[in-house]
Image (tube, grey):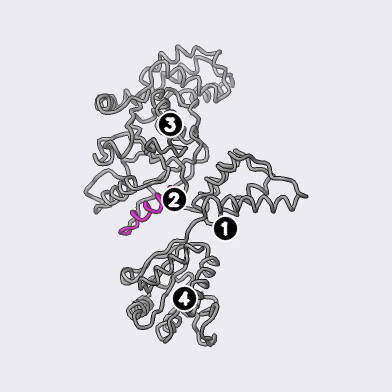
Amino acid sequence: MKTDIHDLCLVLDSGVALVVVETYEEPRVLQLMTRLAIKRQLALFSWAITTGVQRLGFGIDLDQDQGFEKPEAALQLIKQSPDPGLYVLCDFHPYLDDEPKNIRLLKEIALQYDQLKHTVVFLSHRFELPPELKRYGAHFELSLPSDDQLLNIVREEAANWSNQHRGRKVKTDNRTLKKLVANLRGLSAGEARQLARGVIFDDGAITIDDLPEINKAKFTLMDMEGILSFEYDTAKFSEVGGLERFKQWLKDRQSAFLQNDQSLDQPKGVMLLGIQGSGKSLAAKAVAGVWGVPLLRLDFGALYNKYFGETERNLREALKLADLMSPCVLWIDEIEKGIATGLNDQGTSRRVLGTLLTWMAERTTKVFIVATSNDISQLPPELVRKGRLDEIFFVDLPGVEIRRSIFEIHLSKRDQDCQEFDVQKLADITDGFSGAEIEQAVVGALYSAAAEQQQLQMHHLVAAIKGTSPLSVVMAEEIQYLRDWASQRTVLAN
């Protein structure tokens, strides 16, 4: 809190009349403002629609029967007050939309700052100053607890549990405790305490199995309304057939990403280019699964908004959340659909690209990008050049040995004994099939067997394969062009 008070003092010294604080920690901010008012010997007042204007700490008394619960009346009071003061307006955001008189009153308060020294603090979960007021305002962010403070919070909750259970100790180990603290980064003290309490009071233990639940709960607290989603079920590389070069590449960089090795550059991310159904999305999930970090999926479809500037704001908020969730993997699926340059979107795609490139260049957090694409020709060159991402991998159609592995994976996942089938023959007759098409052949064969009330047999699989027209045949020219292009410009993932 000492750092917050120091920073707020700097804001006041800069002569800013309007201060925006976006947070859910209203009691903490009011406590902070009280300490600041005492330090600066300022009168302090708060306003809410339910209570009107109230004095906090010290200052002149107000007549509570004058209707100051109305927003306009509260602003008139601030404007007319002759003494310098701090005024905290709680949840004032609804009263600036289509309210020109309130906007004008705030502007007049700001214009009189040199004479009256009134500072208005807008306290809300989300707040955007209207264009008329932006030049008079500043945003202030509360500091987040350090690792030591988070560890103390966990220990306090462990002590509380122990006191309620006759002195029994919470079961954990130092490695898991450190990982828990790392996963609580980016949360406020109250939020971190809430999650730590939930883990400990569940069973009196902090285990490695609790960490995915912590990450999911953390993400829920930072809800992005569908723009950024938390992928709870991440794959294992044992579920991914082939991609041996890509797997080795990730293995070589795992420790550099997860540990603070100053001698190595932190891995930035990869582009997975390939044919539809070739396993790019599954590989993206597997990166998070193998590294043991959260997987976040950015949905460009939900990102775009018809209002000018909102799309870029949505992207900035999503990237900010990814930073708070670090270390994590950020999966941008079919990235060309979101930032392909075009002439029919009033420049939105270019602005989105600029926002993304700026974040990629300036971020210092451990966010590993896995971008997947079916058509890299639609992507701007400034995104795919070396330095933005570490490597571009091409995920080609699987060869015969990889197809055999894929059949074994999908048969085993469905409780089928691979020894009962001629898997080599299945691999031989599926030349040109993608991994997704092989999976669907297995699924289709199981449906056929169930309809005949039989166990799955070889002829069911062969029939399903013969009834499939793979994409490599349906779109042969387009796929061959993509393979030719990638052969000289990318690294083969297989």
Q: Count the marks: how many?
A: 4
Going 48% across and 69% down the picture, which residue do you hit? Answer: 91
Circle 3 is placed at which residue position? 283
Circle 1 is placed at which residue position? 190
* Of the image marks 3 and 1, the number of the one nearer the N terminus: 1
- Give the numbered dot on residue 321: 2
Question: Residues under labels 3 and 1: Cα distance?
Answer: 36 Å
Amino acid at circle 4? Arg
Camera-nearest residue between 345 and 134: 134
* Of the image marks 1 and 4, the number of the one nearer the N terminus: 4
Mark 2 element type: helix
* Left or right side of 58 for 251: left
Can residue 469 be spotted in the picture?
Answer: no
* Left or right side of 212 for 374: left
Circle 4 is placed at which residue position? 40
Amino acid at circle 1? Gly
